[in-house]
Amino acid sequence: MATIRTIVAALCLGLPIAVSSAQDAAPAAPAAEAPATKGYTGAVTADNVFIRSGPSVQGSYPFGRLMLGNLVQVDEESFGWAKVRTSGPAFGGIHGYVLANESVTLSPDGSTLTVVKATEIRAPNLDADGNPDSSFKVIGSVPANATLKVLGQVNGDREKVHKVVMPDSAVGWININYIRRASPSEVAAGSGTASPAGAAPATTGGSTAPAEKATPAAEEKKAAEKPAPKESAPPPPPVKTEAQLASEKRRADFKDLEAIWEKVKAEPQESAEIAALKSRYQALAADPAAESDIKAMAGTRVKQLQIQGEIQKGIQDARRAQSATNKDDEKLTALRIAMEGRADYTAVGVLNASTVYDGKRLPLLFRLTDPASGQTVAYVAVKDANTMSTMLGTLVGIRGSQRFDEALKVNIIDPGTIDLLTIRKEAQVSPANK
């Protein structure tokens, strides 16, 4: 009966339902009518419940998932969140990060590390696939001389971390709607302190009385005699403030930029959209309202892109010098012809798709590049996406108006007409990210 009520409650609340294994088949006693607000053992009431690095959905990322029936030690409840210790079987599959620095010493076989001086335990960011650079929340510390079991090493762009078995000293937060106070029998079963079968009878005042067996049938009968608690829907989510919405947008923008960063790194060095991407990171780093971790990471990307931009310029200059001696290059010949009549065109170059301005995260723009060096000459506003897509990889002359977009920090041409200056011999180039 208790199991049936748990399933009914889950359906009413719209929660996922897990089919229990044989060893979990014993029904649980109903939750207490007035759960304690601190210092109790809690039971998780649904599958795939996030445990977060802080008491907030907006400001704290998840670092693990708990399953229906998992027991956790609750230290306290506050404003709709339960603060939980990362101890016990429920956290057997959840790991933490320790910075690979002078604070720890790795064993010769790499299986353990010894803490030289107190060090932080960081929560891996599930939203960022555990990327160490995005896993910055501290959820506990480990004292000097402690030993941790090492599961492996993870390298980020900025930091290297040891992946370790989660210590008991860390804490996490669970939404209070997905946890209840565990029954005494659940606590006993979870801690292994339940009386074994055939135990000696309990004695009171010198007399012997048979001990009551806490069997599933007895618990079910007891639960049936007690009125079922009235089910109620969880409270509606709090209305987000403008500051919270703005913070969410900044984090979404940063996550999108990181995805673009990975794509730009994979492009040929001489033609990668380094300048455009750098301007986007600069805008985020200069935002006075941006969170400190976002500003720091954006600033790091700006420095990295600055170095890559200098390397790119050197490659482009070398290519221009080499191309200047190649009089037979078809594109260069066409370019020289076009340049002689430059008054007829606003800009001349090879039309390409843009990785940065792909129409998904930022406005859709095409890119015009110098055929000799690969440098971006300007960006082209989309007039007819289907027609322009057939011109990708082709040298074109564009007539139109040119403007500098203050928001995007790039030169944009609004095309009037586009002329093909060469006929492409190779196969059609498909638009990037289509």
Image (cartoon, rainbow, N blue to C red):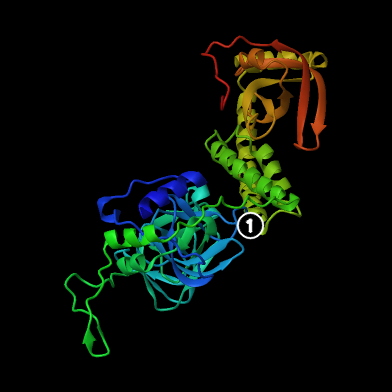
Q: Between residue 148 and residue 179, name the one nearer to us.
A: 179
Q: Which residue of the protein is positioned furthest toward the bottom in this rendering?
A: 206
Mark 1 residue element: helix
Q: Which residue of the protein is positioned furthest toward the left in this rendering?
A: 198
Query: Residue 338, image x and y in percent?
Result: 73, 14
Residue 316, placed above or below residue 219: above
Residue at (67, 58) in percent of width and height: 292
Residue at (59, 38) in percent of width and height: 260
Q: Between residue 291 and residue 43, name the one nearer to us.
A: 43
Q: Between residue 392 and residue 43, name the one nearer to us.
A: 43
Taking the image as shown, residue 33 lies to the left or right of residue 292, namely left
Residue at (43, 57) in percent of width and height: 44
Packing grade of label 1 (10 A; few <14, some 14-19, many >=20) is few
Q: Quadrant of residue 189?
A: bottom left
Query: Residue 351, image x and y in percent?
Result: 65, 20
Dividing the image into 4 quarters, which one contains the C terminus?
top right
Q: Which residue of the protein is positioned furthest toward the front in this rendering?
A: 225
Count up the numbered dots.
Answer: 1
Query: Residue 163, image x and y in percent?
Result: 41, 59
Q: Is residue 166 visible?
A: yes
Residue at (64, 39) in percent of width and height: 274
The residue under label 1 is which amino acid type? Asp
Q: Between residue 180 and residue 90, name the one nearer to us.
A: 180
Pointer 1: what residue? 293
Residue 168, placed above or below residue 417: below
Taking the image as shown, residue 258 lies to the left or right of residue 227, namely right
Q: Is residue 124 visible?
A: no
Query: Residue 146, image x and y in percent?
Result: 39, 76
Taking the image as shown, residue 2 lies to the left or right of residue 262, namely left
Q: Quadrant of residue 365?
A: top right
